[in-house]
Image: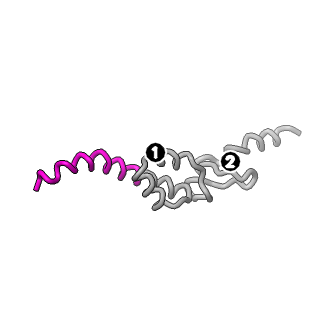
Amino acid sequence: MMESIKPFLGVIIVFGIPGITAAALSWVFARRRARNPLAWALVSSILPVFVFVLYFKKPLAEVPGHFRHCLACGEFSPWKYGGCIYCKPANQESERTP
């Protein structure tokens, strides 16, 4: 019984573990960016490079606790920053000048 499993053990280690890890990371990133977690997990389990693609993609909608939508410029910025990181410096400069 053990001899029949040994050839597949290397395949599971080389492809299975990175695929499961990539799927789990994609699931988390997709939920934080208001995208379809199941689709991204399936694609990333086959091609793990899509984890990096998803990491750098902007969210589709506001996600409470992760990304907020700026009403002034329409961009999404991380929730941990107090306001918009794109138009906040421009708004502060316009307030200072008379």
Query: Which range of residues does the magenta coloring cover?
Result: 1-24
Q: Amino acid at mark 2?
A: Cys
Quadrant of the image containing the N terminus: bottom left
Residue 8 coordinates in the image, percent (x, y): 22, 50
Q: Is residue 4 magenta?
A: yes
Which residue occupies 61% across, 46% down? 81
When asked about the image quadrant of residue 91, the answer is: top right
Rendered image coloring scheme:
one colour
Locate residue 77 relative to residue 95 in the image: left or right.
left
90 or 6: nearer the eye?
6
Secondary structure at badge 2 equals loop
Q: Earlier in the sequence, mark 1 or mark 2?
A: 1
Q: CA distance from mark 1 to mark 2?
A: 29 Å
Q: In the rendered image, which residue does mark 1 sit on? A: 49
Residue 29 coordinates in the image, percent (x, y): 49, 52
Would you say the magenta stretch is mainly helix, strand or loop? helix
Residue 76 coordinates in the image, percent (x, y): 65, 51
| Residue 30: mark in rendering | none
18 or 62: nearer the eye?
18
Dot in front, 1 or 2? 1
Q: Amino acid at mark 1?
A: Val
When asked about the image quadrant of residue 94, the answer is: top right
Q: Is residue 16 magenta?
A: yes
Locate residue 81 relative to residue 70 in the image: left or right.
left
**Crowdedness of circle 2 by 10 Å Cα count: few (<14), some, many (20+)?**
many
Residue 21 coordinates in the image, percent (x, y): 37, 50
Quadrant of the image containing the C terminus: top right
Secondary structure at badge 1 equals loop
| Residue 84: mark in rendering | 2
